[in-house]
Amino acid sequence: MEQMYCYKCTKCGKLHHPHYVVCQNPDCDGREFEKLPLEGKCKLLTWTRVYNLPEGYMKPWLNFGIVQFENGVKASGQIDFDDIENGMELVSTVGVVKEGIGSDHYGFIFRKA
């Protein structure tokens, strides 16, 4: 099973997702990060439905959302259901978000808590 991560600056402690080369804290210039699993409960901040999908998707639409995890990190990913409301509690998993020839693409998939 694939895993998604956030990255903790070892100098100031700021959490990042995705990984950056230099800490994004304006008061820090840290360049070393501790890799931490990013998963579990999260809150939906906003979402959208995309109807005009790229070639290769066999669905009429996909739902995408931006969530905030309990540790404060924000991330985006697919929502796998349709009765969506901002502010709802979700659970993050990692799965195949796009099948590819020779390699699949993994990302966040959000489900109802």
Image: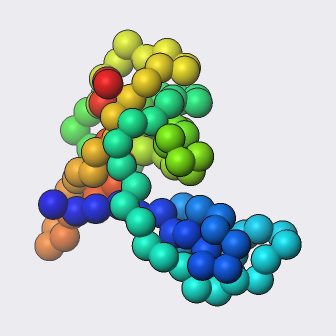
Toward the viewer: 63 or 89? 89
| Image quadrant in which the N terminus is located | bottom left
Toward the viewer: 60 or 68? 68
Residue at image location 84% in from the left, 70% down from the top: 26
Query: Residue most toward the right?
Result: 27
Q: Position of residue 41 (x, y in %)?
A: 39, 36
On screen, residue 107 versus residue 22, left or right, reads: left
Query: Residue most toward the bottom?
Result: 31
Residue at image location 22% in from the left, 38% down from the top: 58
Q: Position of residue 104 (x, y in %)?
A: 21, 63
Q: Position of residue 31 (x, y in %)?
A: 64, 86
Q: Quadrant of residue 46?
A: top right
Residue at image location 43% in from the left, 17% down from the top: 84
In the displayed structure, 25 sits above or below 92; it is: below
On screen, residue 110 versus residue 20, left or right, reads: left
Colouring method of the image:
rainbow
From where the camera sits, is residue 27 visible? yes
Residue at image location 58% in from the left, 63% down from the top: 16
Q: Position of residue 108 (x, y in %)?
A: 36, 48
Q: Quadrant of residue 61?
A: top left
From where the camera sits, is residue 52 visible? no
